[in-house]
Amino acid sequence: MQNSRFLVLTMLLVAGFPAATAAAELLSWEDCLAEASRSNAELRSAQATLESTRALERAAYSGFWPQLSAGISHTDISGNAVSTINPSYNASVIATQNLFAGFQDSAKVEQAGGNRAAAEAALDSTRARLSLDLKNAYAGLRYAQENVSLTARIVQRLEENLRLVELRYESGRENRGSFLLTSASLAQARFENLQARQAIQAARTQLARVLGRRESAELEASGKVPLNEPGPEPQFADLVHLTPDYRATEAQEKVASADLRLARAGFYPSVNLTGSIGREGGDWFPEDERRTIIASVSVPLFNGGRDYYATRGASASLEATRFNKDNVERQVLVRLRQTYNAYVESAEKLKVDQAFLDAASTRAEIARSKYNNGLMSFEDWDRIETDLVQRAKALLASQRERVAAEAAWEQTQGKGVIP
């Protein structure tokens, strides 16, 4: 009895792989994780963007520092009106320090900081999305491989069933309809095996894309995606503020606030202090020394309404980003609850489907023995066999959905496995 049950489970449980071909490249989950972290184009683009914004943020502080320049010149003027030394040479060093620019410098630093924060949120979002894609692609390839194995075993089981029905039909103990139905079920199983074998290449192509490869080759998934059991229900309101989507809107609000300050700077005067030291004369290197200090104040009076309308536009843009932040907060809260619920449900569904398969395997073992001994009708036996096949398929699908649900929950939080 136990040996018979073990045979049924061996045929239909989905833990095994089809044998890999000699040319297949076996990839463990750890191999894929390392390669995607290193080679995925979208991730590398987000990392480069962040480095760019960090450099621009450092550049924004330049407004607080003096500007230094040096130069030399040679002047040769001809004509009756020449009253200075001709030709003349000049060499000088000039330093300019802005003392007040209508708070433009601090606004530029705030603007650059907001852009950097937005790039950090975008990188975290990219990492989480790549983690989701990688888990789905790897689990998808594993599902495709196991589906080939499962459908092949179903074909084998139905071939055995057909031989059993055929023997009973030929001995007059079964009707022709039962024989034809079993034959049709076998044909359907062979068709599904064909579909499963064709689906593998699509799954390989998807995994290759996530890994950053141009060619999918003959990839084979040789392991499982690590899974975690759901913990206690989190505080969703707190999680919202940690997500990349919400942090991105905060960064946008910061940039919009800085844009408003920059627009208002046009209404303020600008104060500059310039000093220079140099030499000039008719010979090179000139010997006559010259020093200059200039303090200047520039007050804007009218520029055609540019500053006024720029300020109005920036103010409206800031208000829009605040409304958008509130809207994103509510949307993220909904997604967090939905993905967490799906994550918890998928973990439980996997356990339920496993329990149903165990029960269906036991029933199929008993039913086959009864049918073979003439103690059960074909219709009852066929229903039990069909249920066994469907339960095996359901478990295989639940295994893939379990990975996808956990990955979606992580992605919504902005987390994942990508370092």
Image (spheres, grey):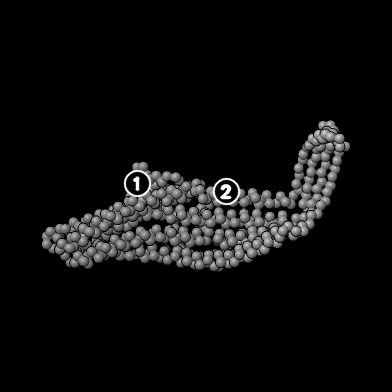
Coordinates of residue 345 in the picture (x, y in percent): 42, 66
Looking at the image, the residue that sits furthest to the front is: 80
- 202 left or right of 296? left
Indicate whether 284 appears above or below 271: above
The residue nearer to you, when weighing 95 against 166, is 95
- 224 left or right of 419? left
Closer to the eye: label 2 or 1: 2
Residue pictured at 58% horizontal, 59% vertical: 248
Residue pictured at 67% horizontal, 57% vertical: 110
Coordinates of residue 36 in the picture (x, y in percent): 48, 49
Residue 207 shows up from this direction: yes
- 404 left or right of 395? right
Quadrant in the rendering for residue 398: bottom left
Q: Secondary structure at mark 2?
A: helix
Q: Amino acid at mark 1?
A: Ala
Q: Callout 1: 10 Å neighbours few (<14), some, many (20+)?
A: some
Coordinates of residue 166 in the picture (x, y in percent): 16, 58
Mark 1, residue position: 20
The label on residue 254 is none
The residue nearer to you, when weighing 114 against 82, is 82
Residue pictured at 36% horizontal, 65% vertical: 352
Task: Locate the N terminus by quadrant.
Answer: bottom left
Residue pictured at 71% horizontal, 60% vertical: 305
Q: Amino acid at mark 2?
A: Ala
Mark 2, residue position: 48
Between the C-alphas of marks 2 and 1, the distance is 38 Å
Indicate whether 75 appears above or below 9: above
Coordinates of residue 221 in the picture (x, y in percent): 39, 50
